[in-house]
Image: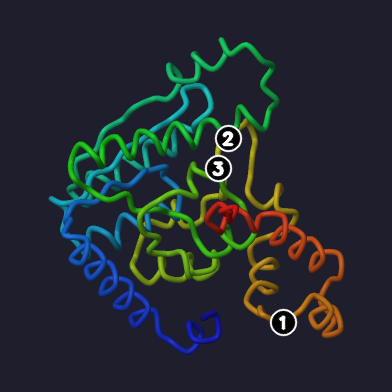
Amino acid sequence: MARDLKLKTMQQIYDKILTDLKSYFKTAGIFKAVIGLSGGIDSSLVLKLTVDALSSENVYGILMPQRGLTADENTYHAKGLAKFFGIKFYEVAINNFLIEYDLLPWRQIELAKMNTKPRIRMTLLYNLANSLNALVVGTSNKSEILLGYGTKHGDCAADILPIGDLFKTQVWELAKFLNLPDEIIKKTPSAELKLNQTDEEELGASYEKLDAILEKLPATKEELIDKGMDAILVSRVFRLMETSKHKREMPPIIKT
């Protein structure tokens, strides 16, 4: 699909996503959508695409900041974009939900605490979706999906992924084509699950370098290294894809 996307114009990609979004909702017999709004590029682009496909009156957003951690700038951008597109949105801080987890009878490691946050957010999204007879529109992109950069049953969960076949670099391209605000496009990507967290620091390279490898799949690790690509980074990318494979598949069923 990566090679096919390179041959398509941004207009063609945009048109294809809208056509498939409309078709999915029509087939499901549901015409309302719920989106988690973070103020980042992925959720902003998904908001734009979903509004264009379903119209603003059928799209609902939820801002779910963690007070004391989520940057005010992100909340400001999320609210501003929601108002600009004319959708109804709610703001629900997740701090009170997290308090209950501090009372658990076991010691939580940092990873457990971090992953609890997107799972709380996804529970809120589905609560609203069920209440409205709506579907949850996810915001994961292809780079995140392939590298496993997401929380299982958290931000990895959704009913449909409009940008799930776009690498992060292509997300930026489409966002520019659709004239999303520069301050959102140029923002440093972060899951904001802990202080000073950035995607690229955790992944070990910029999205440009990561996508340069991912775009060449299904080439093997050995083939990419033989072509002169950074052996350490290529090995890291393939290791991330292998260890996160379970996030991209349904749980295995043990046959009896």
Q: Position of residue 210 (x, y in %)?
A: 68, 66
Q: Position of residue 125 (x, y in %)?
A: 34, 39
Whether residue 204 is situated above or below residue 143 in the rendered picture: above
Q: Which residue is labeled 2 in the image? A: 115
| Mark seen at residue 132 | none
Residue type beneath disc 2: Asn
- Looking at the rendered structure, the secondary structure element under dot 2 is helix
Q: Nearer the viewer, mark 3 or mark 2?
A: 2
Instruction: Please tell me which residue is depicted at 39% across the width and 32% down the height of the picture.
Output: 64
The residue that mark 3 highlights is 191
Q: Secondary structure at mark 1?
A: loop
> Considering only vertical position in the picture, is 138 above or below 168?
above
Q: Report, in whole angstroms, how far the alpha carbon at label 3 lies from the one at label 1.
A: 29 Å
Q: Is residue 224 left or right of residue 33?
A: right
Quarter of the figure with residue 182: bottom left
N-terminal label among 3 and 1: 3
The residue positioned 86% from the left and 70% from the top of the image is 231
Q: Name the secondary structure under disc 3.
A: loop
Question: Residue 29 location, x and y as percent?
Answer: 16, 60
Whether 64 is drawn above or below 178: the answer is above
Residue 188 in the image: above or below residue 28: above
Look at label 3 and name its amino acid.
Answer: Ala
Upstream in sequence: badge 2 or badge 1? 2
